[in-house]
Image (cartoon, coloured by chain):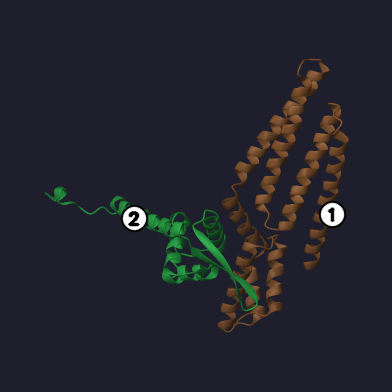
Chain colours: A brown, B green
Amino acid sequence: MYLSKEQIKQIENRVRASEVEEGSLFVDIVDHMCCSIEERMDNGNSFEQALREVFEIFDRKHIEDIKIATLSLTQNKFIMKKRTTIIGGIAVATILAGVLFKQLHLMGADIVFGFGILLLCFGFFLSLMLDKVTILTNNTLKLASILGFLGVSAVILGTGLTFLRFPIAPYLIGFGSIFLVLYYLIINVVKNATNKSK
Amino acid sequence: MYSNELVRGTLKTVILQLLSFKDKMYGYELSKEVKEKTEGKIILTEGALYPILHKLEKDGYVTTIFETVGNRKRKYYMLTGKGKSHAKDRKNELLDFMQTMQSLVDPKPSLSSCI
């Protein structure tokens, strides 16, 4: 006995409510729950009764636990986060050192400041973006993360280069802002679509 | 039922072995097979099964295909060539470990100790 489309939709909504993105793990969990329900129905239970029993086992926390256990085993999240934090810390320290050098009129202040800005953009933000993209299963959200990275990096780089009086700086800020607007538009469209499906 | 502490380290090997017996298997089938073969002494929970399957997939030991069953998608797991040889290695390691454990916890008296 196989479940109908309407019955499967109830199960999919439960999995979606636990913020499991549609993809490989989503298919696994939905199929597992469907099989559990079908087995109970084959043993004489009604769909409603079987659904209730399976939902008691697969509550929101249980599904989230499966998701977190899968992500932490496959993504090695802790190491990625630590790496990102270290790069970010070094970048901020370098920028502050550059500002301090400038205040004290020391030589090489612009170079230190510029290096810090580059490290922040192409070290910290790139690492942060990679952390996020490897976890996401939704391609639209992956694209949004890449646009967000490009936007933030361009704006920060542009702002940093403004202080160093580079003529390209305003263009970078302009392009960065466009990317950030696109990022927020995509994120909002995806959020609205998810809320509607719930 | 055995304690989680005993079972935890062997689950990957168990899953690899079960996959080596068949062409392809899906998650629920694997958990049912473990329950039936061990008469309920080992329960492969979803919280343990899917992280291991996804890690095996990421490491290239298993490959997957999606098929439509009834009105939904089902993901089947299959061992790759690398996975087959890994399954063999893990099995040998486990058998060796079991022998070592037996000699530790239930040593048979040797002839020399009797004389």
Q: Which residue is mark 1?
A: A185
Q: Is residue A157 above or below residue A30?
A: above
Marks 1 and 2 belong to one chain: no
Q: Residues within 10 Å of mark 2 (few under 14, many from 20)?
A: few
Mark 1 lies on a secondary structure that is: helix
- Residue A123 versus residue A71 in the image, above or below: above
- SS label for mark 2: helix
Q: Is residue A4 above or below residue A15?
A: below
Side of A196 relative to B76 (left or right): right
> Which numbered dot is residue B24?
none
* Mark seen at residue B98: 2
Q: Position of residue A39 (x, y in %)?
A: 56, 78
Query: To which chain does the residue with label 1 belong?
Result: A
- Picture residue at 73% right of the left edge, 34% below the top: A120
Foreground label between 1 and 2: 1
Q: Quadrant of residue B92?
A: bottom left
Q: Is residue B30 left or right of residue A95?
A: left
The x, y position of residue A140, in whole percent, is 74, 57
For marks 1 and 2, give the CA distance: 58 Å
Foreground of the two, A77 or B81: B81
